[in-house]
Image (cartoon, rainbow, N blue to C red):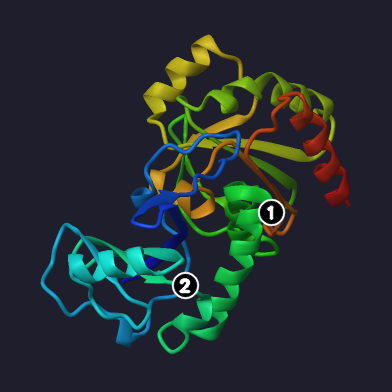
Amino acid sequence: MYSYLNVVYIEIVFKSSKMRILQIILVLSLLSCQSASSEDVKTNQPEAPQSMQPNNQTTNGIVFRDAQGNFLTDAEKDSIVQNLESVQALRRYDDENNNTEYILFQDYEDLRGFLEDDVIANLIEENKLMRSGGRGAVINKRINDQWIDKPLPAGDLNMLDGSTKSFADYKGKMLVINFWYINCGPCIAEMPYLNDLVDKYSNEDIQFLALSFDSKTDIKNFLQRTEFKYEQGAITRAFMYDFTPVSPGHFIVDEEGIIRDILIGAPRQTSIIYQRLISVIEKNKK
C-alpha cells in the first residue's frame, strides 16, 4: 500500500529571535537520466504496519503525520515545524487514497513501534549515504540490494524483428544489458563506447542487449540516425523501473542468468564507461 521513497531533510534556520524560515536541503543527483517524477518510481520498501494506515478520508492530496502516525492539522504541522530545532520528513505514497504523506520526526528512534526495526536500520544507513555520497549513492544501494546475486525475472522482451523473447533465451552465455531511452542524453553519449565494447568482444561468447521503454517504432527511427550495436528490445516502463529508475544502467549477468554486477548512471567523463564495463566483464568471465 505504501512505498517509502526518500527522506526529505528539513532544517529550521533562525533568521532572528522572532522569525524562522524553512529550508529544504537539495542534494545532487547522478549525472544520469530519470525519466519520470518520483511518483512514477516503484521501490521495494516494506509495507507500513497497520498502525500507520490512513484513517481519514482525504484523497488526491498532501497530508502530514507526526512520528506516532497521527494526522496533523495545518496548525499542528506548523507548530512542529516552528518549534523544533530540526525536523525530518519521511515521504511516502498512499495508493488507496492517492495521497502523498509526510511523516514529521526528529530522530529515527522516534519512529520505532510504527516502522519495523530493519526498515529503520535501512533508513539510518541511507541517511549516512545521502550525506556522504548524495542521492546517487542511495539509489545505487537500493538497486544493488535488490538485484545483486539475484536471477533475472520473467517478462516479455519485444524485439525489433517482431519476435518476443525472455531473459531465459540468453542463458548459457554472459549477458550485458543496457537500460536506456531515447530522451536520455547520457545514454546516447555513451553509445560509441558501447559499440567499441561490442567490437572488442565480438569473438567471445558474450551477448549485448539494450532495452528501452520507447516504442519499437521510435527505437527503429532512432537507430536509423544513431548506430547502436547492441541487440535491441522494448519493454514496459514499469518493467524497466523494476530494474532501475535511473538511466543509463548496465547489468552484468552470468551464464546461469544471475546478476553479478551493476553500474548505474553515467560518469562525468563519458569515455570512462568503456573501461568500467571491461573491468566488470573480465571479473565475471569464466
Is 218 on the left-hand or right-hand side of 211?
Answer: left
Against 123, residue 223 (above or below) is above
**Location of residue 84 in the rendering, given as x and y in whole percent from the top left corner:** 41, 69
Q: On the image, which quarter does residue 118 sit in?
A: bottom right
Q: Amino acid at mark 2?
A: Gln
Identify the element where label 1 is drawn.
helix
Residue plotted at (52% across, 50% down): 166
Is 147 on the left-hand or right-hand side of 233?
Answer: right
**Location of residue 106 in the rendering, given as x and y in whole percent from the top left corner:** 47, 72
The answer to whether residue 76 of the structure is visible from this angle is yes
Against 148, residue 251 (above or below) is above
Residue plotted at (14% across, 76% down): 56
- According to the image, label 2 marks what residue? 106
Identify the element where label 2 is drawn.
loop
Mark 2 nearby-residue class (10 Å; few <14, some 14–19, many ≥20)? some
Q: State which mark lies toward you, 1 or 2.
A: 2
Q: On the image, which quarter does residue 190 sit in?
A: top right
Extreme residue toward the bottom, this view? 113
